[in-house]
Image (tube, rainbow, N blue to C red):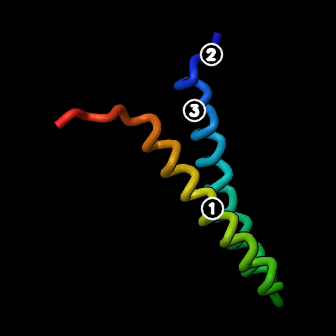
């Protein structure tokens, strides 16, 4: 049975993969010639949202330290 930590790690892996894939997609859209600026902006916004979600998940996986 999967633990909460396992599911968080799996989700984190999926988000990181999608974030990396967006780099490729954005580069291809830009290199394809006359680019659709709105499409590029939407892809970059999605990438930023993924970055925020990745950071949130990473913070959930790091145990709180008692000072």
Which quarter of the figure has residue 29?
bottom right
Which mark is first along the chain, 3 or 2?
Answer: 2
Q: Residue at x 58, y 40 (%)?
A: 12
Label at residue 8? 3
Which quarter of the figure has residue 66?
top left
Q: Residue at x 54, y 50 (%)?
A: 54
Q: Position of residue 4 (x, y in %)?
A: 57, 23
Label at residue 32? none
Q: Which residue is drawn at 52% across and 25% down?
A: 5
Label at residue 2? 2
Q: Position of residue 43 (x, y in %)?
A: 73, 70
Mark 1: secondary structure: helix
Residue hosting label 1: 49
Q: Which residue lies furthest to the left in this view?
A: 67
Q: Nearer the viewer, residue 56 or 24?
A: 56
Check disc 2: other Cα within 10 Å, few if <14, some if 14-19, many if 20+. few
């Amino acid at each position: 049975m999967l633990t909460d930590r396992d599911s968080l790690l799996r989700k984190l892996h999926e988000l990181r993969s999608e974030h990396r894939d967006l780099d490729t997609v954005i580069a291809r859209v830009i290199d394809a010639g006359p680019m659709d600026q709105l499409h590029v902006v939407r892809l970059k916004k999605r990438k930023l949202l993924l970055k925020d979600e990745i950071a949130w998940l990473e913070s959930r996986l790091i145990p709180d330290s008692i000072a």
